[in-house]
Amino acid sequence: GLGGGGIFDYNLFVDMSYHSQVRQVPGEEMEKTVYYMLNMVAKEVGDVKKAQDAVLDYLRTNSDAKKFLERDAPELEFILLSEEEIVKLIQTQVGQFEAFITSIGFISLLVGTVGIANMMLVSVRERTREIGILKAFGASKRDILQVFLFEASLMGAIGSLIGVIVGIGLGYLFTSHSFFATTRMPLTYKLEWIPISVIIGLLVGIISGLYPAWRASKVNPIEALRYE
């Protein structure tokens, strides 16, 4: 055995639910139930690496598992992971997923910027006569600029707020619904990211509306009043 006082002076915990496979012992006319996974706990944190090396060396040289592997699946290899390695693996996967989501976010911002700018340009063209009337009543270029910038920024802020609500809803759906997730996972998000998202949407709206607002402020009031 691998328990304390056995071949190695480390603790070994075996979950009996893993004891589910039956294999024939190499060179003998008998079958044994076998484990496909073992959990081992070192007595001290500093012993983890020594325990890993010792167990892996045993499995690859003197164990029955080596005989099973050579006979049934020579292309396979033993895998021994510590909790630290598992955490690093998860962190790597999460980092890659975050990078993927971030790239999608940047593309979405670009598309949103172009979309708002296009809508504001159409709005300026359709409201040319209205702009002329405002200027005829004394509205300055700055007033016209502020009106269109306010509309564009409001559009960006509302869009980002809707995006936050939809994102949280989809996150809850993917983490809790059995159709998307095999196990239920808690949905966690930072509250401070909600106002940050709205502020980013606001900035996107302002940037998108700069050129349309400038075009609107440059409209000739006389020509605008003639516009149909």
Image (cartoon, rainbow, N blue to C red):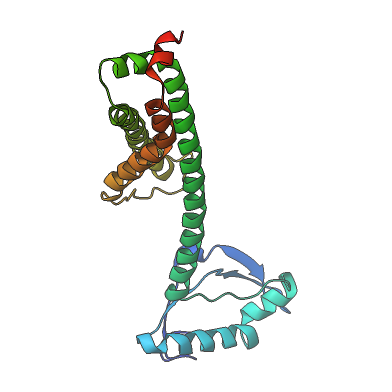
**136 vs 209: above or below:** above
Provide residue 140's location: percent of width, then percent of height: 28, 26
Q: Nearer the viewer, residue 5 or 193?
A: 193
Provide residue 207's location: percent of width, then percent of height: 40, 40
**52 vs 139: above or below:** below
Provide residue 64's location: percent of width, then percent of height: 63, 80
Provide residue 212's location: percent of width, then percent of height: 43, 30
Q: Residue at x 30, y 15 (%)?
A: 136
**217 vs 184: above or below:** above
Q: Quadrant of residue 58?
A: bottom right
Q: Quadrant of residue 149?
A: top left
Q: Nearer the viewer, residue 62 or 161?
A: 161
Asked whether the viewer can see residue 1, the reply is no
Asked whether the viewer can see residue 153, the reply is yes
**183 vs 173: above or below:** below
Q: Quadrant of residue 155?
A: top left
**198 with respect to 24 (left or right):** left
Q: Residue at x 56, y 84 (%)?
A: 56
Direction front: furthest residue: 222
Q: Residue at x 46, y 32 (%)?
A: 117
- Total marks shown come to 0
Q: Residue at x 33, y 34 (%)?
A: 153
